[in-house]
Image: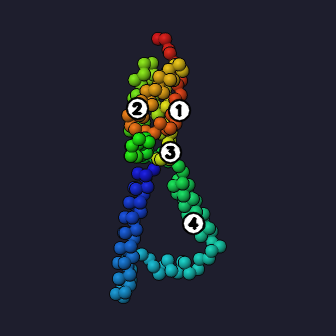
């Protein structure tokens, strides 16, 4: 979502700069006593002079603008996964690590356990208080081995021991060919 925000902000900025330059140019033409080149200002003024708040076009425009604004507000308020999470246990100074790096390293550590395949890790929560959820194919009896492997990798990252780790193993579907 941040990428979309940056692109939208850039496009909006360029459009506002272009509109501002066009308005300055048109204003300079009007000050010089010439008619505007691109903007039909007199026609717009005449149309707006007879338009009332009760007109259908005003209502439709107001509803569309309100819905777009509400959609943007909801999109911005939805919680997102953090880009980075706080690491550094109680013994050391806190430092930040990439969420994707934690996900990748713990998935690899879980995949190294014999019989565990297709490990997928999600890091959720706030950057200062986060939890890890690992889903993989494996026998339910291997849960403790996977938990130890993941905790070992989190210890190497110096993550606080109280960080919640949820391991879910699904029995793999074995097909005989």
- On residue 147, which mark appears? none
Q: Dot 3: few (<14), some (14–19), or many (≥20) neighbours within 10 Å?
A: some
Residue identified by numbered label 1: 166
**Residue at left offset 50%, top offset 42%:** 130
Q: Dot 1: few (<14), some (14–19), or many (≥20) neighbours within 10 Å?
A: some
Q: Quadrant of residue 5?
A: bottom left
Taking 108 as reference, is 76 above or below it?
A: below
Residue identified by numbered label 2: 153
- Are the residues tagged 2 and 3 within 8 Å (C-beta)? no
**Residue at left offset 40%, top offset 32%:** 153
> Where does the image place residue 127, in percent across and percent down from the top left?
47, 47
Query: Distance of mark 1 from mark 2, alpha carbons?
Result: 14 Å
Residue identified by numbered label 4: 61
Mark 3, secondary structure of its residue: loop
In front of the other: 40 or 31? 31
Residue 104 in sight from this viewpoint? no
Left or right position of 48 against 3 = right
> Where does the image place residue 169, in percent across and percent down from the top left?
52, 25
In front of the other: 97 or 139? 97
Mark nearest the camera among 1 and 4 is 1
> Where does the image place residue 42, in percent across and percent down from the top left?
47, 81
Query: Distance of mark 1 from mark 4, alpha carbons?
Result: 49 Å
Mark 4, secondary structure of its residue: helix
Mark 1 or mark 4, earlier in chain: 4
Residue identified by numbered label 3: 129
Left or right position of 167 against 102 = right
Mark 2, secondary structure of its residue: helix
């Amino acid at each position: 979502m941040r990428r979309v925000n940056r692109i939208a902000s850039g496009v909006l900025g360029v459009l506002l700069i272009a509109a501002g330059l066009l308005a300055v140019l048109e204003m300079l033409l009007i000050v010089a006593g010439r008619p505007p080149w691109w903007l039909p200002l007199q026609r717009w003024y005449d149309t707006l002079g007879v338009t009332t708040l009760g007109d259908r076009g005003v209502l439709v425009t107001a509803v569309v603008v309100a819905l777009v604004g509400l959609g943007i507000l909801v999109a911005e308020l939805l919680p997102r996964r953090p880009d980075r999470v706080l690491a550094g246990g109680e013994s050391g100074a806190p430092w930040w690590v990439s969420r994707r790096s934690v996900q990748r390293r713990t998935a690899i550590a879980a995949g190294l356990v014999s019989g565990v395949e297709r490990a997928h890790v999600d890091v959720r929560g706030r950057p200062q208080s986060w939890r890890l959820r690992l889903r993989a194919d494996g026998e339910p009896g291997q849960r403790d081995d996977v938990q130890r492997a993941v905790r070992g990798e989190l210890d190497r990252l110096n993550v606080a021991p109280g960080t919640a780790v949820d391991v879910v193993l699904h029995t793999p579907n074995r097909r005989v060919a």
